[in-house]
Image: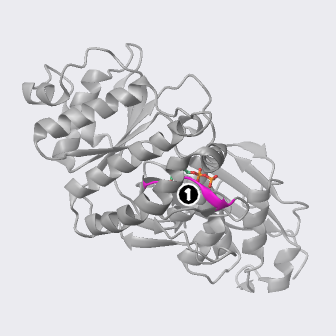
Amino acid sequence: MAEEKWVMMVTAQTPTNIAVIKYWGKRDEVRILPINDSISVTLDPDHLCTLTTVSVSPSFDRDRMWLNGKEISLSGSRYQNCLREIRSRADDLEDKEKGIKIEKKDWQKLHLHIASHNNFPTAAGLASSAAGFACLVFALAKLMNVNEDPSQLSAIARQGSGSACRSLFGGFVKWNMGNKEDGSDSVAVQLVDDKHWDDLVIIIAVVSSREKETSSTSGMRESVETSLLLQHRAKEVVPVRILQMEEAIKNRDFTSFTKLTCSDSNQFHAVCMDTSPPIFYMNDTSHRIISLVEKWNRSAGTPEIAYTFDAGPNAVLIARNRKVAVELMQGLLYCFPPKPDTDMKSYVLGDTSIVKEAGLEGELPQGIKDKIGNQDQKGEVSYFICSRPGRGPVVLQDQTQALLHPQTGLPK
Ligand code: DP6
């Protein structure tokens, strides 16, 4: 390896994912091994994703990382485990054009610079760690010429954050809990790609929260230690639901999908309540959104909208198709209008064609009023994001998108 001042880099984009059958509880805290399987839908990276540039150079004197422009420490065990695992799989690499040759053994001595950026506010509590660790592992695997398939990479991303393993694929993804002690069979697999069920529209209501929530990591630890309901859920409920959910997804059976998604979200929050001391992730606005959807589905006579909530008050609503999504957006904007000083451009993000089609002028049609019922209390939604099922990670060829400077390897 020549000791010149070259810098090599790779930039990747990785989506975030939302679980429809939740992961909650670990059987191994270090390797991050779950007590049950889970299933998620990957969101379109155009609307929610992480961009990560990883670079290597003989001139770097230590591993460094910048997250959303601020330098962060890589000393935590989650980062260290991911870096160790990926380095141990690195392979020979040659860039003939630049005259660079890195041998397998060199990777142990070479240091890395990493810069990562979310295209959505980190404070929104939208599973940024899932996309973040998946992107880190995916980009490093490309940089270091790691010859492993996405499932094997998912087992590395899992050691950064459990839900990250599901962000290595697009469409609908299952994380098999596995049963080996070393975690080698606790990997994610793709159930179907993003084209399989592309009628679905996903609307996220980012709900303002006043308090800092319990992190997923400590919340699920407390549930494992204290909740009997969690034991029952993992042993008896989830195994059956996983099979039913796989069937519903395969057949694009929205009625079963909605029933399973809503029940699983509600059971996850019931487990949180069954934890001692109880954990409250949803707030009044979250509860109002649940009521609105339940009322809507009842009045439509058949399920048209599914809801799911993670470790926070944000609602993830999955509409059966675009027509329902447009009506739902009209209803949501009626119940949760923007504050007078907020313009629509910053109130509805992502696929804004939905809100354009919804048309904001004039009275809310009676049909929609009937579906949402009497919603006289105004809730607190910070903004909405419209999205859809999306693809898995990709390498970006356009060098101008890199977050690190191609000569110095420092943030741009
Ligand atoms: C409620 O993956 O954030 O979003 O593995 O400790 O990093 P760690 O937890 P994390 O937990 C996600 C929990 C959840 C459900 C889910 O995504 O399945």
The scheme the figure's colours follow is one colour
Q: Position of residue 191 (x, y in %)?
A: 38, 71
Give above or below for 205 relative to 158: above
Q: Which residue is drawn at 24% across and 36% down?
A: 294
Q: Give the range drawn in magenta.
A: 21-28
Q: In this view, does 114 lie to the left or right of 372?
A: right
Q: Would you say 92 lies left or right of 26 here? A: right
- Quarter of the image holding residue 333? top left
The relative height of residue 147 versus residue 161 in the rendered view (above or below) is below
Residue 85: image quadrant is bottom right
- Locate the N terminus by quadrant: bottom right
In the image, is residue 27 part of the stretch drawn in magenta?
Answer: yes
Tell whether position 148 is magenta. Answer: no
Q: What element carries label 1?
A: helix
Q: Identify the amino acid type marked 1.
A: Ser
Residue 301's spot in the image, x, y percent? Answer: 10, 42
Query: Measured along the vertical axis of the image, is residue 336 above or below residue 239?
Result: above
Q: Name the residue under label 1.
A: 163
Locate residue 181, reporting x and y percent. 68, 75
Residue sitting at x 61%, y 73%: 153
**Residue 157 screen position, x and y as percent:** 63, 65
Between 207 and 255, the one nearer to me in the picture: 255
Horizontally, residue 327 falls left or right of residue 70, namely: left
Mark 1 lies within 8 Å of ligand 1 (Cβ measured)? yes
Residue at 79% of width from left, 62% of height from top?
A: 80
**Location of residue 381 (image quadrant):** top left
> Is residue 327 something that shows in the picture?
no
Of 354 and 99, which appears nearest the observer?
354
Direction left: furthest residue: 366
Residue 348 can be seen, yes or no: yes
Q: Categorize mark 1 by other alpha carbons within 10 Å: few (<14), some (14-19), many (20+).
A: many
